[in-house]
Amino acid sequence: MSEEKKIVIVNSRGLDDERSSVAWSIANTAVASGIKTTVFLVSSGVDWARKGAADAAQLNPLDPKMSEMIDNVIQSGGEILVCPPCAKVRGYTEDCFIEGTILAGAPALLERIMAGAESVSL
């Protein structure tokens, strides 16, 4: 019996950085491939989980809209974790974030990695 494949994608890039699009593309490919996917948003990456923030964003014209990629990860069973100190320093509270996100810090990230998840950082 094979072990479930897992990945954690750490995204520290915000609304103005095309590398964010790469992170969400990887996450979408992972969930579509049946890989248990966690996106961990840190630094300016936490903006992606703010209500309404991704609605008009399309950093790469060849990719779907960012809000569609984020929604797809959530709807496909992926996790989106938001770094609590990163949110707090920006004045964000739990109410600021889209449904399906979880405020969770480094211990949650490390727990997933120690449980066998591969990790990618952007």
Image (tube, rainbow, N blue to C red):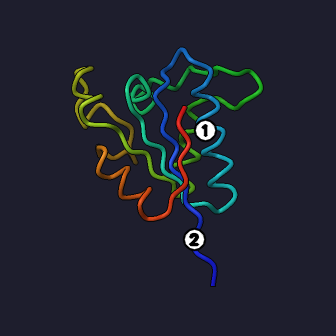
* Image quadrant assignment for residue 114: bottom left
Q: Which mark's residue is nearer the viewer, 1 or 2? A: 2
**How far separated are the C-alphas under marks 1 and 2?**
23 Å
**Would you place residue 59 above or below residue 8 in this image?**
above
Residue 96 got which mark? none
Q: Identify whether 64 is placed above or below 99.
A: above
Q: Is residue 37 left or right of residue 44?
A: right
Front in this rendered view, residue 47 or 100: 47
Q: Residue furthest bottom?
A: 1
Q: Position of residue 41 (x, y in %)?
A: 42, 36
Q: Identify which amino acid the numbered label 2 is placed on.
A: Glu
Marks 1 and 2 in Cβ contact (< 8 Å): no
Which residue is located at x 29 percent, y 28 percent?
A: 86
Q: Position of residue 106 (x, y in %)?
A: 31, 45
Q: Secondary structure at mark 2?
A: loop
Circle 1 packing at 10 Å, graded few (<14), some (14-19), many (20+), is many
Residue annotated with mark 1: 69
Quadrant position of the C terminus in the picture: top right
Residue 4 place in picture, x, y as percent: 57, 71
Task: Choose top left, top right, bottom left or bottom right for residue 7.
Answer: bottom right
Q: Which residue corresponds to the image point at 59% horizontal and 30% vertical from the top-left? A: 66
Amino acid type at circle 1 is Met
Residue at the (45%, 51%) spot, across then down: 79
Image coordinates for residue 118, horizontal then vertical, percent: 55, 54
Considering only order in the chain, which callout, 2 or 1, is on the residue closer to the N terminus?
A: 2
In the rendered image, the vertical position of residue 51 relative to residue 120, given as above or below:
above
Q: Secondary structure at mark 1?
A: helix
Q: Nearer the viewer, residue 108 or 55?
A: 108
Is residue 4 found left or right of 85 in the rendered image? right
Residue position marked by numbered label 2 in the rendering: 4
The residue positioned farthest toward the front in the image shown: 114
